[in-house]
Each structure stands twice: as structure tokens, then as C-alpha cells.
């Protein structure tokens, strides 16, 4: 399911991520994903049985949303992505979302989201005590 226009987050031109983010679009996507989570919970699926997963910009939105949940989810699976609006993550991340397991993988040769964009943020997650196991692989993930 596509929740946003691919250019909502950034045009992937290699320029600094923070300067190109569409905060309103990111928060709108978060709201749409949260509505889907609420729909599944209403159908009887416990939040601890729900995964958010995404690739590229979908992974960015899944990570952004997963860190801001009031109850822990089963996990986040994030491939070739970064944390959008990283500067707000520490204040917006809930204490219970820090219990959600996160796996991130990223191709070292990914031309859209270079691994160097992810690495500094990984250090930031650790500073906020957000467990973030992850890996990079030599593949091109496009």
C-alpha cells in the first residue's frame, strides 16, 4: 500500500536529508499508518503481534512511526532507510516504543540512501537508548 507520494520525504538527490524533509507529509503518513494499526487492533490483533516493515522511504516512515507508538509493537523491519525528522525523535519517541525490537539492514552501495546517512543516526539511537541491531551488506539495494 502506498501511503504517500514518493517525493514527500525527499527527492533522493544526494543533498542533505534534513534540509529536504516534508514534515507535514511525514506526520500525515504516520497518522495513516496509525489508523491501520488501530483498525487491526479493533479486529482483535494485539499490538505486540503487529510488525511495521518498509524499504527505502517506506522504511523511513515505518521507523518514524514505530518509534512514536504508545504501546510496543512486535517489531520494526527497516531496509535501506533512515530516520526522518531525527531531531524530534528523542522528544517524540515514547518510553514504551523503546521496547519494540528494531532490525535495520542497509546496502553499502545503495545509491539512493548512502550508508553514511544511516551510520550517524545509529549512534544517535544508541544515545537515546533505542536498541538498534543492524547490518550493512555490500549489495546495491535498488
Image: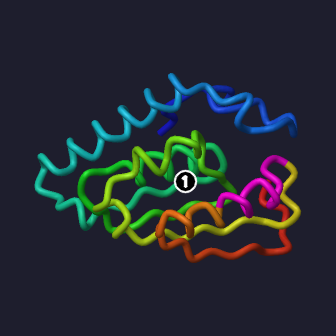
Q: Which residue is mark 1?
A: 54
Q: Position of residue 87 (x, y in %)?
A: 58, 43
Q: Name the colour scheme.
A: rainbow
Looking at the picture, does residue 23 appear above or below residue 61? above
Residue at the location (24% across, 57% down)? 71
The answer to which quarter of the image holds residue 118 is bottom right
Lateral position of residue 80 relative to residue 71, left or right: right
Lateral position of residue 75 relative to residue 135, left or right: left
Residue at the location (78% across, 50% down)? 113
Looking at the picture, does residue 86 appear above or below residue 73? above
Q: Position of residue 44 (x, y in %)?
A: 11, 56
- How many numbered markers are drawn? 1
Main SS of the magenta part reads helix
Lateral position of residue 108 relative to residue 136, left or right: right
Depth check, front residue: 29 or 129: 129
Instruction: Specify start and end residues of the magenta stretch as a single range.
Output: 112-121
Depth check, front residue: 137 or 19: 19
Residue at the location (65% across, 66% down)? 123
Lateral position of residue 30 relative to residue 115, left or right: left
Looking at the picture, does residue 57 appear above or below residue 11? below
Q: Is residue 108 magenta?
A: no
Q: Position of residue 89 (x, y in %)?
A: 49, 48
Depth check, front residue: 135 or 92: 92
Label 1 residue SS = strand
Q: Position of residue 34 (x, y in %)?
A: 31, 40
Q: Residues within 10 Å of mark 1 (few under 14, many from 20)?
A: some
Residue at the location (26% across, 66% down)? 49
Amino acid at each position: 500500500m502506498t501511503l504517500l507520494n514518493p517525493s514527500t520525504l525527499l527527492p533522493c538527490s544526494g543533498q542533505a536529508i534534513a534540509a529536504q524533509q516534508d514534515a507535514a507529509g511525514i506526520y500525515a503518513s504516520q497518522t495513516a499508518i496509525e489508523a491501520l494499526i488501530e483498525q487491526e487492533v479493533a479486529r482483535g490483533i494485539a499490538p505486540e503481534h503487529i510488525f511495521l516493515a518498509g524499504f527505502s522511504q517506506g522504511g523511513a516512515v515505518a521507523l518514524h512511526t514505530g518509534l512514536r507508538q504508545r504501546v510496543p509493537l512486535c517489531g520494526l523491519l527497516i531496509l535501506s532507510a533512515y530516520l526522518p525528522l531525527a531531531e524530534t525523535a528523542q522528544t517524540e519517541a515514547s518510553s514504551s516504543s523503546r521496547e519494540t525490537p528494531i532490525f535495520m539492514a542497509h546496502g553499502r552501495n545503495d545509491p539512493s540512501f548512502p550508508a553514511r546517512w544511516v551510520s550517524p543516526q545509529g549512534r544517535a539511537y544508541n544515545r537515546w537508548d533505542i536498541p538498534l541491531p543492524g547490518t550493512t551488506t555490500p549489495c546495491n539495494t535498488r
